[in-house]
Image: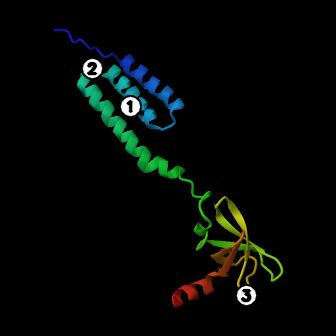
Amino acid sequence: METLWMIEPWHWLVLGFVLLIVEMFVPTFACLWFGAAAIIVAALLWLIPISLTVQIIIWLILSAIFLLAWFKFVKPLSVDRTKAGLGGSVIIGETGMIILAPQPDRAGMVRFSVPIVGAAEWMCRTRGEQVAVGDRVVVTDIVGNELIVSTMTSHAVINKNI
């Protein structure tokens, strides 16, 4: 008895490319992995004869593996670490380096290794503490658009006393 459904390798190939094209219009990265799995099934089917049930199982397993690999390994690499768009309180506790020492009559400038809330450099002041260019400081407060900073050693003493 002949089977009603005869799946050829080119069927899987067409399905794979259709899913890849759909991915261009639906940017979820889900169709991409289903399409890649379908293309691999097409290649396997060209090499060895496989029953339809095994083809579908291979496609589902490959799709699941690709999706898990995407969420476990690739997607975390694209996480935005700038904290842009978040409230100012995310700056408190961050450490940076003084690039322009604050004076009583003008603000200084602190630079962070990673941009914080959209900027790598911020105006800063201290609360009576002397800091020099190159000193490592920690943000303790925010007043307007300026950060209040203290040296790493005095911040450690303050935290130890609390």
As measured in the structure, the alpha-carbon distance from the residue carrying label 3 to the one carrying label 2 is 79 Å
Image colouring: rainbow
Residue extending farthest right: 105
At 37% across and 18% down in the image, what residue appears? 11
Q: Is mark 1 on a helix, strand or loop?
A: helix
At 45% across and 27% down in the image, what residue appears? 19
> Where residue 8 is drawn, which disc sits there?
none
Residue 6 versus residue 49: which sits nearer the camera? 6
* Mark 3 in CB contact with mark 1 (< 8 angstroms): no
Residue for badge 3: 128
- Residue 29, compared with residue 95, is above or below; it is above
Residue for badge 1: 37
- Counting residues from the start of the chain, the first of labels 3 and 1 encountered is 1
> Is 5 on the left-hand or right-hand side of 82?
left
> Is 14 on the left-hand or right-hand side of 82?
left
Residue 53 versus residue 159: which sits nearer the camera? 159
Q: Is mark 2 on a helix, strand or loop?
A: loop
Q: How crowded is mark 2: few (under 14 residues within 10 Å), some or many (20 or more)?
A: few
- Residue 63, compared with residue 17, is above or below; it is below
> Is 60 on the left-hand or right-hand side of 93?
left
Residue for badge 2: 49
Instruction: Look at label 3 and name its amino acid.
Output: Gly
The image quadrant of residue 42 is top left
- Residue 121, compared with residue 70, is above or below; it is below
- Counting residues from the start of the chain, the first of labels 1 and 2 encountered is 1
Instruction: Look at label 1 and name its amino acid.
Output: Ala
Q: Position of residue 119 (x, y in %)?
A: 69, 61
Q: Is mark 3 on a helix, strand or loop?
A: loop
At 43% across and 20% down in the image, what residue appears? 14
